[in-house]
Image: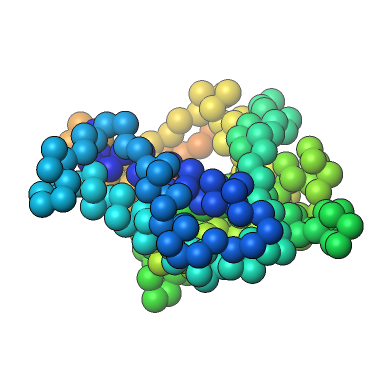
Amino acid sequence: MPELFGYGRAVHVAIEKLHEIFNDRAPTRAEASNIAEQHFHLKHIAPSRDPETRPGAYENAKQKARQIASDYVHEYAEDFAQQRQVEVRFEIPARDCLITGSIDLLMRCDDAGEIVEAHVLDFKTMEGGADPLNNAQLEWRELSLQVQLYAKAAREVFGENAATGSIHLLKDNQRVEVPIDDASVGAAIENVEWAVQGILDQDFPMRPSPKKCEKCDFNRLCSKRMEQFRINAGVPPPILTPAGPRVAAAIDTAS
Ligand code: SF4
């Protein structure tokens, strides 16, 4: 069990609560910090018995969550005044599969309260660093695919005009825009359908690569012998990410 299992969720809940409670003005740093503290909970880590003089992992994580919430409301204050955030669950059918999940949407409304635009926003408890697009810790394929599927859901299920989409890296408060035009969303869906078809066909060839094998649980048992997909498996189009087009990890032997 990773020590901070559930931390990302705890931070996410705090951000959601802030948008729920403050829907016409931005909270102050102190208000944001208090909300993060009130809603902070880590199921698998016990708080210190002496949090004042001997704070442990739980207290340190809570302090960091308070800081993240405080920085977030300071940097993105206008989101609270002009937009409201909602989390909505969705189901969208694709070929031989059903894609389900929940989306965070930032809705911009006009003076009459009508929704003018929806922005798909995916919060991650990650750090972008000086150059998020070249940060080896960020897998832009996965991050982009997620936002693009959310954009499809926002448009098709809720009828919202999702004009933009982004990943919000909470640890250093960076928001990176992800392409959600028709070509990008279409490529994302084709990648999902390709992967689902492979699973249904039980087509699981061994695809070793230094980066994947290094972290794989089967590393010591596996022969790491390159195998090909079945002859008619086809190749999905590249996933369109803010860092440029990327082929699916299963066929990218360099990844
Ligand atoms: S060690 Fe084997 S199973 Fe694991 S990623 Fe590499 S090839 Fe795949």
Quadrant including the C terminus: bottom left
Question: Would you place residue 220 above or below residue 178 in this image?
Answer: above
Image quarter for residue 118? bottom right
Residue nearest the viewer, comparing 80 with 168: 80
Image quarter for residue 2? top left
What residue lies at 74% left-to-right and 45% top-to-bottom? Answer: 154
- The number of callouts visible is 0
Question: Would you place residue 226 above or below residue 77 in this image?
Answer: above
What residue lies at 68% left-to-right and 58% top-to-bottom? Answer: 24
Q: Does residue 107 appear to the left or right of 138 in the view shown?
A: right
Q: Residue furthest right?
A: 112
Determine if residue 122 is in view: yes
- Residue 45, percent across and down? 24, 35
Describe the colour scheme in one phrase.
Answer: rainbow
- Residue 228, percent across and down? 46, 39
Residue nearest the viewer, comparing 29 with 235: 29
Q: Does residue 22 appear to the left or right of 10 in the view shown?
A: right
Ligand 1, image quadrant it occupies: top left
- Residue 78, percent across and down? 64, 68
- Residue 81, percent across and down? 68, 64
